[in-house]
Image (spheres, rainbow, N blue to C red):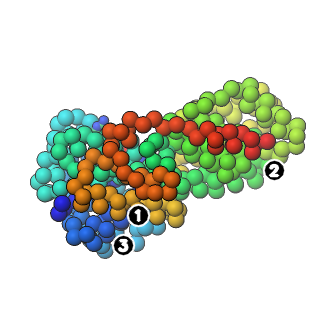
Amino acid sequence: MKKIAVLTSGGDAPGMNAAIRAVVRYGIDKGLKVMGVRRGYAGLINGEIFEMTRHSVSDIIHRGGTILKTARCEEMKTEEGRKKAVNVLNVFGIDGLIIIGGDGSFKGAQVLSKLGVATIGLPGTIDNDLAYTDVTIGFDTALNTVLDAINKIRDTSSSHERVSVVEVMGRNCGDIALYSSIAGGAEKVIIPEKGYDLNDLCKTILEGKRRGKLHNLVILAEGVGGAKELASKVEEITGIESRATVLGHIQRGGHPSSFDRILASRLGARAVDLLIEGKSSRVVGRRDGAIIDMDIDEALSMKSEVNEELYELSRILSY
Ligand code: ADP
């Protein structure tokens, strides 16, 4: 292993830059040449590849987004596109590729490894929807962004004695909603893994009001449905003024938290070590505080499950 490359793919996440920095600096420290690929798989296919130095990753550890840019690339899903990607890697003499992204990006890594490229995946997504790892890079930062918003919405919600439905990201995974509901002291969390009953929800809201609750915060995961629609149904049934807030892309930006920076740094270093050891087709993650790696096929076959203990805790602490 003499020359490796790194790319970011799929949805961006705060902490991706810290991971790139770790790969570049750790790789150079181990005597490797480290190349950067711009715009994910699209840039790989087009040969947008350049050498990175210790200096090229200066002043990025605290920045959200990704200096390498990211893209979605349909061509990578075709046989022709994948072949082009392999050819480009050969032309540049690249022996190993580190892919920072979510499950879609990992599928790309999986096919490249089957075509003989040494690949290692790093979990970069705010959604926390990869079952093999307790946390993904960006999740903690997104959670803190949501929490900041909830704190502010709570103030105005209390003043007006309203119901506030806050829609958060996470695709089909309810983790951002669940964790932020506990940290933000929400009255109700609605996640795709559990669904909800509208009458039960309205009953909880009315009972809360009767007991003197000043506000009713409902955290809704995007995978369940729209916040506006839910707020208007709640208002119609309960008679309590209800407002919807869709947090949207602010959840994907901002300075990464210390947790995400350290996680990304550790995962980046492990990915480089794996390539040096001649490993391929693996993904790196964190379990019970330790950095782990796992076969990519096995990791992708694991189903993301909701943390039942936290879901129950959220319910108990909310009234
Ligand atoms: P994320 O990595 O955040 O889950 P996507 O699901 O959009 O984001 O995937 C990112 C990119 O990974 C896609 O645009 C595509 O280039 C690549 N990709 C996704 N699925 C496959 C697949 N089955 N085969 C090859 N490449 C894929």
Q: Which residue is mark 3?
A: 58
Q: Residue 312 bears which disc, if any?
A: none
Mark 1 residue type: Ser
Q: Is residue 53 left or right of residue 262?
A: left
- Which of these two is toward me, 86 or 132? 132
Q: Residue furthest left?
A: 91
Nearest to viewer (mark 2 / mark 1): 1
Could you say which quadrant of the image residue 50 lies in?
bottom left
Q: How far apart are the two marked residues, 2 and 1, measured between alpha carbons?
A: 43 Å
Look at the numbered discs 3 and 1 and tell me whether their residues touch, using CB distance below 8 Å.
no
Residue located 69% across and 34% down the image: 231
Q: Is 44 above or below relative to 306?
A: below
Mark sitting earlier along the chain (3/1): 3
Q: Residue 159 bears which disc, if any?
A: 2
Few, some or many residues within 10 Å of mark 2 (<14, 14–19, 20+): few
Q: Locate the C terminus by quadrant.
A: top right
Residue located 13% across and 57% down the image: 93
Mark 2 residue type: Ser
Could you say which quadrant of the image residue 205 lies in?
top right
